[in-house]
Image (cartoon, grey):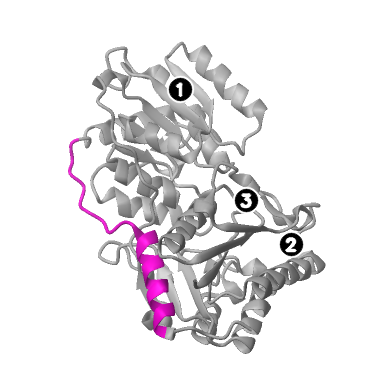
Amino acid sequence: MSRIVIWFESIVGGGHLQVADLLARGALAAGLETHLVSGSFHRSPDLDFGGAVRHAYPKELGLHHEAARGYVTANGIPLASAGALLERRRAFLHDVIGQVRPDAILTEHWPFGRGHLDREILPVIEAVKADRPWTRLYGSARDVMLLAEGEHAGGSADASADIVNRLFDRIFVHADPAFVRFEDSFPATARIQAKLSYTGYLVHPMSRREIWPDERRPVVVSCGAGRTQDGADLYLAAIACRQMLPPRHPLAVRPWQFFVSPAYDEEFLQFVRERASASGCEVDVVGNLPGPAFRAALVNAALSISLGGYNTVIETYVADVPAVLLPHHNRAGGQSRRAQAFAVLGKMVVLPHAGRCDPRCLRSALERAWSKRHVKQRPLRLAGEGALGAQIAHDLAEVGAMPTS
Protein backbone atom coordinates (compact mmCIF):
# COMPACT_ATOMS: atom_id res chain seq x y z
CA MET A 1 0.00 0.00 0.00
CA SER A 2 1.36 3.43 -0.95
CA ARG A 3 1.86 5.89 1.89
CA ILE A 4 1.25 9.63 2.05
CA VAL A 5 2.11 12.24 4.67
CA ILE A 6 -0.11 15.34 4.82
CA TRP A 7 1.34 18.38 6.62
CA PHE A 8 -0.88 21.26 7.72
CA GLU A 9 -1.43 23.87 10.42
CA SER A 10 -4.65 25.64 11.42
CA ILE A 11 -3.46 28.55 13.52
CA VAL A 12 -6.35 31.02 13.19
CA GLY A 13 -9.72 29.31 13.51
CA GLY A 14 -10.44 25.80 12.28
CA GLY A 15 -10.78 26.14 8.51
CA HIS A 16 -7.52 24.43 7.64
CA LEU A 17 -8.44 21.56 9.97
CA GLN A 18 -11.63 21.02 8.00
CA VAL A 19 -9.68 21.07 4.75
CA ALA A 20 -7.10 18.62 6.13
CA ASP A 21 -9.89 16.30 7.22
CA LEU A 22 -11.21 16.25 3.66
CA LEU A 23 -7.74 15.76 2.16
CA ALA A 24 -7.15 12.79 4.47
CA ARG A 25 -10.51 11.26 3.60
CA GLY A 26 -9.80 11.64 -0.11
CA ALA A 27 -6.43 9.91 0.26
CA LEU A 28 -7.90 7.10 2.36
CA ALA A 29 -10.73 6.55 -0.12
CA ALA A 30 -8.09 6.10 -2.82
CA GLY A 31 -6.47 3.29 -0.81
CA LEU A 32 -3.49 5.25 0.52
CA GLU A 33 -2.04 4.70 3.99
CA THR A 34 -2.49 8.24 5.27
CA HIS A 35 -0.50 10.11 7.92
CA LEU A 36 -1.12 13.66 9.15
CA VAL A 37 1.44 15.95 10.82
CA SER A 38 0.21 19.04 12.67
CA GLY A 39 0.20 20.95 15.93
CA SER A 40 -3.48 21.84 15.52
CA PHE A 41 -5.40 18.63 16.22
CA HIS A 42 -6.52 19.89 19.63
CA ARG A 43 -8.46 22.76 18.03
CA SER A 44 -11.17 20.43 16.67
CA PRO A 45 -11.28 17.30 18.84
CA ASP A 46 -14.45 16.09 17.08
CA LEU A 47 -12.58 15.49 13.81
CA ASP A 48 -11.26 11.96 13.27
CA PHE A 49 -9.73 12.51 9.81
CA GLY A 50 -11.30 9.30 8.56
CA GLY A 51 -9.03 7.21 10.78
CA ALA A 52 -5.75 8.53 9.34
CA VAL A 53 -2.69 8.21 11.57
CA ARG A 54 -2.00 11.46 13.42
CA HIS A 55 1.44 12.73 14.40
CA ALA A 56 1.01 15.72 16.71
CA TYR A 57 3.81 18.15 17.42
CA PRO A 58 4.53 18.25 21.17
CA LYS A 59 2.43 20.86 22.93
CA GLU A 60 5.41 23.09 23.63
CA LEU A 61 6.01 23.35 19.87
CA GLY A 62 2.49 24.65 19.21
CA LEU A 63 1.71 27.98 17.55
CA HIS A 64 -1.09 30.47 17.80
CA HIS A 65 -1.98 33.92 16.52
CA GLU A 66 -2.48 37.18 18.39
CA ALA A 67 -4.14 40.14 16.74
CA ALA A 68 -1.52 42.58 17.99
CA ARG A 69 1.64 40.48 17.56
CA GLY A 70 0.89 37.96 14.84
CA TYR A 71 2.19 34.39 15.09
CA VAL A 72 3.64 33.43 18.45
CA THR A 73 4.83 30.26 20.18
CA ALA A 74 3.06 28.45 23.00
CA ASN A 75 5.20 30.56 25.38
CA GLY A 76 4.22 33.82 23.73
CA ILE A 77 7.48 34.40 21.86
CA PRO A 78 7.07 36.04 18.43
CA LEU A 79 7.76 33.43 15.79
CA ALA A 80 10.35 35.62 14.10
CA SER A 81 12.47 35.27 17.25
CA ALA A 82 11.84 31.56 17.74
CA GLY A 83 14.53 29.97 15.60
CA ALA A 84 15.21 27.23 18.15
CA LEU A 85 11.53 26.24 18.22
CA LEU A 86 11.35 26.09 14.43
CA GLU A 87 14.43 23.89 14.43
CA ARG A 88 12.76 21.49 16.87
CA ARG A 89 9.63 21.46 14.72
CA ARG A 90 11.80 20.77 11.67
CA ALA A 91 13.43 17.84 13.47
CA PHE A 92 10.03 16.43 14.47
CA LEU A 93 8.71 16.59 10.90
CA HIS A 94 11.94 15.10 9.56
CA ASP A 95 11.69 12.19 12.02
CA VAL A 96 8.05 11.45 11.12
CA ILE A 97 8.86 11.37 7.42
CA GLY A 98 11.88 9.18 8.14
CA GLN A 99 9.70 6.72 10.06
CA VAL A 100 6.82 6.63 7.58
CA ARG A 101 8.99 6.76 4.42
CA PRO A 102 6.08 8.03 2.33
CA ASP A 103 5.65 7.65 -1.40
CA ALA A 104 4.04 11.10 -1.45
CA ILE A 105 3.95 14.24 0.68
CA LEU A 106 1.10 16.78 0.51
CA THR A 107 1.52 20.23 2.07
CA GLU A 108 -1.69 22.14 2.75
CA HIS A 109 -1.47 25.90 2.01
CA TRP A 110 2.36 25.91 1.77
CA PRO A 111 4.27 26.98 -0.33
CA PHE A 112 1.74 29.72 -1.10
CA GLY A 113 0.97 30.67 2.51
CA ARG A 114 2.65 29.75 5.80
CA GLY A 115 5.82 31.55 4.75
CA HIS A 116 6.61 32.09 8.43
CA LEU A 117 7.25 28.31 8.61
CA ASP A 118 9.71 28.16 5.71
CA ARG A 119 12.57 27.42 8.10
CA GLU A 120 10.69 24.38 9.35
CA ILE A 121 9.40 22.74 6.22
CA LEU A 122 11.64 23.78 3.32
CA PRO A 123 14.79 22.01 4.57
CA VAL A 124 12.79 18.82 5.16
CA ILE A 125 11.29 18.85 1.67
CA GLU A 126 14.69 19.55 0.12
CA ALA A 127 16.22 16.65 2.04
CA VAL A 128 13.45 14.27 0.97
CA LYS A 129 13.88 15.22 -2.68
CA ALA A 130 17.66 14.73 -2.40
CA ASP A 131 17.53 11.38 -0.56
CA ARG A 132 14.41 9.87 -2.17
CA PRO A 133 13.89 11.72 -5.47
CA TRP A 134 11.04 9.44 -6.50
CA THR A 135 8.89 10.76 -3.63
CA ARG A 136 6.01 12.73 -5.13
CA LEU A 137 5.47 16.19 -3.68
CA TYR A 138 2.03 17.84 -3.87
CA GLY A 139 0.67 21.18 -2.73
CA SER A 140 -2.91 21.99 -1.75
CA ALA A 141 -4.30 25.46 -2.52
CA ARG A 142 -7.69 27.07 -2.02
CA ASP A 143 -9.74 28.85 -4.66
CA VAL A 144 -8.55 32.33 -3.66
CA MET A 145 -4.90 32.78 -2.76
CA LEU A 146 -4.72 36.47 -1.88
CA LEU A 147 -2.06 36.83 0.81
CA ALA A 148 -0.69 39.82 2.64
CA GLU A 149 2.87 40.88 1.87
CA GLY A 150 5.38 38.53 3.49
CA GLU A 151 2.97 35.62 4.03
CA HIS A 152 4.05 33.78 0.88
CA ALA A 153 6.67 31.08 1.16
CA GLY A 154 9.98 32.73 0.39
CA GLY A 155 8.42 36.14 1.04
CA SER A 156 6.75 36.75 -2.34
CA ALA A 157 4.56 35.14 -4.99
CA ASP A 158 7.57 34.77 -7.28
CA ALA A 159 9.54 33.03 -4.53
CA SER A 160 6.62 30.66 -3.99
CA ALA A 161 6.60 29.89 -7.71
CA ASP A 162 10.34 29.20 -7.56
CA ILE A 163 9.77 26.63 -4.82
CA VAL A 164 6.95 24.99 -6.78
CA ASN A 165 9.02 24.69 -9.95
CA ARG A 166 12.06 23.39 -8.12
CA LEU A 167 10.43 20.84 -5.83
CA PHE A 168 6.75 20.13 -6.51
CA ASP A 169 5.23 17.62 -8.91
CA ARG A 170 1.66 18.94 -8.82
CA ILE A 171 -0.41 21.66 -7.16
CA PHE A 172 -4.05 20.83 -6.44
CA VAL A 173 -6.34 23.86 -6.62
CA HIS A 174 -9.59 23.24 -4.78
CA ALA A 175 -11.89 25.20 -7.07
CA ASP A 176 -13.92 24.97 -10.26
CA PRO A 177 -11.84 26.59 -13.04
CA ALA A 178 -15.00 27.54 -14.92
CA PHE A 179 -15.93 29.69 -11.91
CA VAL A 180 -12.75 30.87 -10.15
CA ARG A 181 -9.27 30.55 -11.58
CA PHE A 182 -6.00 30.55 -9.65
CA GLU A 183 -4.54 33.38 -11.72
CA ASP A 184 -7.36 35.63 -10.51
CA SER A 185 -5.61 35.87 -7.13
CA PHE A 186 -2.08 34.45 -7.41
CA PRO A 187 0.05 36.79 -9.55
CA ALA A 188 2.76 34.25 -10.48
CA THR A 189 0.36 31.63 -11.81
CA ALA A 190 1.73 31.76 -15.37
CA ARG A 191 5.05 30.42 -14.09
CA ILE A 192 3.49 27.29 -12.56
CA GLN A 193 0.50 26.78 -14.86
CA ALA A 194 1.69 23.38 -16.09
CA LYS A 195 1.69 22.01 -12.54
CA LEU A 196 -1.86 23.03 -11.61
CA SER A 197 -4.66 20.46 -11.27
CA TYR A 198 -8.15 21.70 -10.42
CA THR A 199 -10.01 19.24 -8.20
CA GLY A 200 -13.29 21.04 -7.70
CA TYR A 201 -14.34 22.37 -4.30
CA LEU A 202 -13.79 20.32 -1.14
CA VAL A 203 -16.93 19.80 0.92
CA HIS A 204 -18.12 17.45 3.64
CA PRO A 205 -21.30 15.44 2.99
CA MET A 206 -24.47 17.39 3.79
CA SER A 207 -27.47 15.70 5.33
CA ARG A 208 -30.87 15.72 3.62
CA ARG A 209 -33.14 18.71 4.21
CA GLU A 210 -35.86 17.70 6.67
CA ILE A 211 -39.53 18.19 5.84
CA TRP A 212 -40.47 20.94 8.29
CA PRO A 213 -43.11 23.67 8.36
CA ASP A 214 -41.47 26.77 6.92
CA GLU A 215 -41.85 28.78 10.12
CA ARG A 216 -39.69 26.22 11.97
CA ARG A 217 -36.72 26.81 9.70
CA PRO A 218 -34.30 29.07 11.58
CA VAL A 219 -32.05 31.93 10.64
CA VAL A 220 -28.58 30.53 11.40
CA VAL A 221 -25.85 32.93 12.53
CA SER A 222 -22.29 31.58 12.61
CA CYS A 223 -18.72 32.84 12.40
CA GLY A 224 -16.69 29.70 11.84
CA ALA A 225 -14.24 28.33 14.41
CA GLY A 226 -12.04 31.41 14.80
CA ARG A 227 -12.15 34.44 17.04
CA THR A 228 -12.24 37.81 15.27
CA GLN A 229 -13.65 41.23 15.98
CA ASP A 230 -15.69 40.92 12.78
CA GLY A 231 -17.34 37.81 14.18
CA ALA A 232 -18.10 39.45 17.52
CA ASP A 233 -19.56 42.48 15.74
CA LEU A 234 -21.75 40.29 13.56
CA TYR A 235 -23.27 38.39 16.50
CA LEU A 236 -24.30 41.64 18.19
CA ALA A 237 -25.54 43.28 14.99
CA ALA A 238 -27.65 40.19 14.26
CA ILE A 239 -29.34 40.41 17.66
CA ALA A 240 -30.13 44.10 17.11
CA CYS A 241 -31.36 43.36 13.60
CA ARG A 242 -33.69 40.63 14.84
CA GLN A 243 -35.05 43.00 17.47
CA MET A 244 -35.95 45.67 14.91
CA LEU A 245 -37.90 43.36 12.56
CA PRO A 246 -41.69 43.84 12.60
CA PRO A 247 -43.54 40.92 14.29
CA ARG A 248 -45.03 39.63 11.02
CA HIS A 249 -41.83 39.92 9.01
CA PRO A 250 -41.07 36.54 7.37
CA LEU A 251 -37.72 36.39 9.16
CA ALA A 252 -39.26 37.33 12.53
CA VAL A 253 -41.82 34.50 12.65
CA ARG A 254 -39.09 31.86 12.95
CA PRO A 255 -36.35 31.09 15.50
CA TRP A 256 -32.83 32.44 15.19
CA GLN A 257 -29.92 30.16 16.13
CA PHE A 258 -26.51 31.57 17.01
CA PHE A 259 -23.53 29.21 16.92
CA VAL A 260 -20.67 30.88 18.78
CA SER A 261 -17.15 29.77 17.92
CA PRO A 262 -15.35 27.76 20.63
CA ALA A 263 -12.43 30.17 20.21
CA TYR A 264 -14.42 32.80 22.14
CA ASP A 265 -14.26 32.45 25.91
CA GLU A 266 -17.18 31.57 28.15
CA GLU A 267 -17.52 35.21 29.18
CA PHE A 268 -18.24 36.29 25.61
CA LEU A 269 -20.67 33.40 25.08
CA GLN A 270 -22.55 34.45 28.20
CA PHE A 271 -22.51 38.10 27.07
CA VAL A 272 -24.14 37.16 23.74
CA ARG A 273 -26.74 35.07 25.59
CA GLU A 274 -27.59 38.00 27.84
CA ARG A 275 -27.93 40.37 24.90
CA ALA A 276 -30.15 37.86 23.11
CA SER A 277 -32.31 37.36 26.18
CA ALA A 278 -32.69 41.10 26.70
CA SER A 279 -33.89 41.47 23.10
CA GLY A 280 -37.11 39.65 23.98
CA CYS A 281 -36.90 37.70 20.72
CA GLU A 282 -36.69 33.97 20.04
CA VAL A 283 -32.90 33.71 19.82
CA ASP A 284 -31.05 30.54 20.85
CA VAL A 285 -27.33 30.99 21.54
CA VAL A 286 -25.18 27.87 21.78
CA GLY A 287 -21.53 26.99 21.57
CA ASN A 288 -20.36 25.83 18.18
CA LEU A 289 -21.62 22.38 17.20
CA PRO A 290 -19.42 19.60 15.81
CA GLY A 291 -19.20 19.76 12.03
CA PRO A 292 -21.92 17.23 11.11
CA ALA A 293 -24.43 18.78 13.52
CA PHE A 294 -23.70 22.30 12.29
CA ARG A 295 -24.07 21.22 8.66
CA ALA A 296 -27.42 19.61 9.52
CA ALA A 297 -28.56 22.90 11.07
CA LEU A 298 -27.37 24.83 8.02
CA VAL A 299 -29.08 22.60 5.46
CA ASN A 300 -32.38 23.01 7.36
CA ALA A 301 -32.06 26.78 7.73
CA ALA A 302 -34.26 29.42 6.15
CA LEU A 303 -31.30 31.77 5.80
CA SER A 304 -27.64 31.93 6.89
CA ILE A 305 -25.59 34.84 8.21
CA SER A 306 -21.84 34.17 8.36
CA LEU A 307 -18.33 35.27 7.54
CA GLY A 308 -16.79 34.28 4.19
CA GLY A 309 -14.40 31.41 4.94
CA TYR A 310 -13.77 28.67 2.38
CA ASN A 311 -15.65 25.90 4.20
CA THR A 312 -18.60 28.04 5.31
CA VAL A 313 -19.23 29.49 1.87
CA ILE A 314 -19.10 26.19 -0.01
CA GLU A 315 -21.26 24.46 2.62
CA THR A 316 -23.79 27.30 2.35
CA TYR A 317 -23.78 26.88 -1.42
CA VAL A 318 -24.39 23.12 -1.14
CA ALA A 319 -27.10 23.67 1.49
CA ASP A 320 -28.82 25.87 -1.13
CA VAL A 321 -30.05 28.44 1.38
CA PRO A 322 -30.02 32.22 0.91
CA ALA A 323 -27.21 33.87 2.82
CA VAL A 324 -25.63 37.10 3.94
CA LEU A 325 -21.83 37.00 3.95
CA LEU A 326 -19.65 39.35 5.99
CA PRO A 327 -16.14 38.63 4.72
CA HIS A 328 -13.45 38.82 7.39
CA HIS A 329 -11.54 42.07 6.83
CA ASN A 330 -7.76 41.72 6.65
CA ARG A 331 -4.89 43.12 4.60
CA ALA A 332 -5.18 40.51 1.87
CA GLY A 333 -8.93 40.49 1.25
CA GLY A 334 -9.25 36.81 0.31
CA GLN A 335 -12.65 36.32 1.93
CA SER A 336 -14.01 39.43 0.19
CA ARG A 337 -12.90 38.14 -3.21
CA ARG A 338 -14.53 34.74 -2.54
CA ALA A 339 -17.76 36.28 -1.23
CA GLN A 340 -18.11 38.52 -4.28
CA ALA A 341 -17.60 35.53 -6.57
CA PHE A 342 -20.23 33.41 -4.82
CA ALA A 343 -22.71 36.29 -4.76
CA VAL A 344 -22.81 36.05 -8.55
CA LEU A 345 -24.30 32.55 -8.21
CA GLY A 346 -27.56 34.09 -7.06
CA LYS A 347 -28.42 33.32 -3.43
CA MET A 348 -25.73 35.13 -1.46
CA VAL A 349 -25.49 38.82 -0.60
CA VAL A 350 -22.29 40.48 0.62
CA LEU A 351 -22.57 42.84 3.59
CA PRO A 352 -19.96 45.62 3.20
CA HIS A 353 -17.47 45.69 6.04
CA ALA A 354 -18.46 49.25 6.91
CA GLY A 355 -21.97 48.01 7.72
CA ARG A 356 -20.98 45.11 9.98
CA CYS A 357 -22.07 46.88 13.18
CA ASP A 358 -25.18 48.51 11.75
CA PRO A 359 -28.37 46.44 12.17
CA ARG A 360 -30.08 48.53 9.48
CA CYS A 361 -27.43 47.55 6.94
CA LEU A 362 -27.76 43.93 8.01
CA ARG A 363 -31.54 44.08 7.70
CA SER A 364 -31.25 45.44 4.16
CA ALA A 365 -28.85 42.63 3.24
CA LEU A 366 -31.12 40.03 4.85
CA GLU A 367 -34.13 41.20 2.88
CA ARG A 368 -32.17 41.12 -0.37
CA ALA A 369 -30.96 37.59 0.40
CA TRP A 370 -34.46 36.48 1.36
CA SER A 371 -35.78 37.73 -1.97
CA LYS A 372 -33.34 35.37 -3.69
CA ARG A 373 -34.43 32.21 -1.86
CA HIS A 374 -36.00 30.67 -4.98
CA VAL A 375 -33.08 31.43 -7.31
CA LYS A 376 -31.56 28.36 -8.91
CA GLN A 377 -27.80 28.48 -8.45
CA ARG A 378 -25.48 27.46 -11.27
CA PRO A 379 -23.72 24.11 -10.69
CA LEU A 380 -20.14 23.98 -9.45
CA ARG A 381 -17.62 21.17 -9.59
CA LEU A 382 -17.53 19.58 -6.11
CA ALA A 383 -16.10 16.46 -4.42
CA GLY A 384 -12.55 17.76 -4.81
CA GLU A 385 -11.30 15.44 -2.08
CA GLY A 386 -12.17 12.40 -4.20
CA ALA A 387 -10.52 13.85 -7.31
CA LEU A 388 -7.37 14.59 -5.32
CA GLY A 389 -7.11 11.07 -3.90
CA ALA A 390 -7.73 9.46 -7.27
CA GLN A 391 -5.09 11.62 -8.99
CA ILE A 392 -2.43 10.86 -6.37
CA ALA A 393 -3.18 7.13 -6.54
CA HIS A 394 -2.94 7.30 -10.35
CA ASP A 395 0.38 9.16 -10.19
CA LEU A 396 1.87 6.65 -7.76
CA ALA A 397 0.67 3.70 -9.84
CA GLU A 398 2.40 5.23 -12.87
CA VAL A 399 5.64 5.61 -10.94
CA GLY A 400 5.45 2.01 -9.74
CA ALA A 401 6.95 0.40 -6.67
CA MET A 402 9.98 2.24 -5.30
CA PRO A 403 12.63 1.18 -2.80
CA THR A 404 11.57 1.19 0.83
CA SER A 405 14.97 1.95 2.30
Residue found 38% across the figure and 55% down from its top: 338
Task: Tell me where residue 144 sits by quadrant.
Answer: bottom left
Mark 1 is surrounded, within 10 Å at the Cα level, by few (under 14), some (14 to 19) or many (20 or more) other residues, namely many
Q: In the image, which disc is placed on residue 79?
A: 2
Q: Position of residue 125 (x, y in %)?
A: 62, 78
Instruction: Indicate left or right for 248 with 402 as reference.
Output: left
- Identify residue type, mark 1: Ala
Residue ID for mark 3? 41
In this rendering, the label closer to the viewer, 3 or 1? 3
Q: Position of residue 112 (x, y in %)?
A: 52, 70
Say whether residue 355 is visible.
no
Q: Which stretch appears magenta?
A: 374-398
Residue 141 is labelled as none
Q: Position of residue 282 (x, y in %)?
A: 42, 15
Q: Name the foreground residue: 52 vs 234.
A: 52
Marks 2 and 1, how far apart at CA: 39 Å
* Left or right: 14 in relation to 39: left
Q: Is residue 182 above or below residue 74?
A: below
Residue at mark 1? 240
